[in-house]
Image (spheres, rainbow, N blue to C red):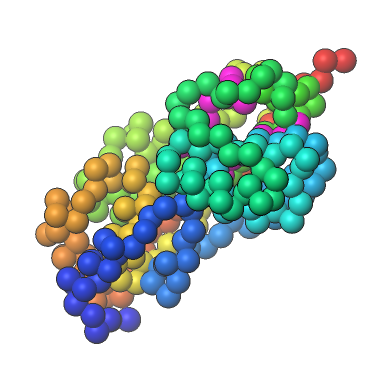
Amino acid sequence: MATTRTFEDLVAEAEAASVDGWDFSWFEGRATEERPSWGYARAMGERLARVSAALDIQTGGGEVLGSAPRLPPLTVATEGWPPNVAKATALLHPRGAVVVASPEDAPLPFADEAFDLVTSRHPVHTYWQEVARVLRPGGRYFSQQVGPASVFELVEYFLGPQPEEARNGRHPDRARAAAEAAGLDVVDLRSERLRIEFHDIGAVVHFLRKVIWMVPGFTVDEYRPQLRALHERIEEKGPFVAHSTRFLIEASKPRND
């Protein structure tokens, strides 16, 4: 459905909006995305309720971890981006969770076999050897991850056709192989392709500012001609449709017996 707002107005609003944390409420009424059938937040909450020590890696602003009805007595979250560290701390400290500022590409700053459960929603990269190291025997890693060629209709609109390695770099089969190479047993692996609709150009701009790895170095100034053309396309033909891919992986560390 066409908007009555100008391209400049929509873009300016999206540029001014905060992109801290993983709160996507700004998109309400402007973009939609199907959700995976497995219900990651609910399933994570069920697992958190059954353990005594848990680690959430790359927690963002702590929104998903904070949605759990019950947190274990020892709950730790890591995050590498300073604005998100502050946001996660404000959200999770009142629940008794500790937030540790830790770069995404550094070893986890915890002792061996420290946790019964390690979780992560949409990690930039999974360091499987580190996950295996900090899990106790019998412990589990539970994660929802971005799959191959996710939202590539939008990526390729701006960047052009992508090489096969970029399209399949996040394939769930690779995650299985990496988990098994680290000594973990994969007990569940599921994937789904999900429809996304962007209803105005502001939603596109906000998405690319928030999910920064989609179009690396994205700025409105650099891509203004493409953004304006996409705005006109949405106004004329309706929402821009893309598809995200998600996979759920659960892996167990073998017991010592």
> Per the image, is 124 magenta?
yes
Q: Residue at x 12, y 59 (%)?
A: 225
Q: Residue 42: where, in percent of width, then height?
A: 70, 55
Residue 40 position (above or below residue 31) = above
Instruction: Indicate the position of residue 198 as horizontal and vertical percent values.
Output: 36, 66
**In this view, which residue lies farthest toward the top?**
257
Q: Quadrant of residue 183?
A: top right
The one nearer the camera, 18 or 211, is 18
Residue at the outermost right position: 257
Q: Is residue 38 visible?
A: no
Vertical order, 95 against 16 (above or below): above
Decide if residue 129 is in sight here.
yes
**Horizontal side of residue 195 vs 40, given as left or right:** left
Q: Which residues are magenta?
A: 116-132
Q: Is residue 171 left or right of residue 201?
A: right
Q: In the visual, does 87 lie left or right of 3?
A: right
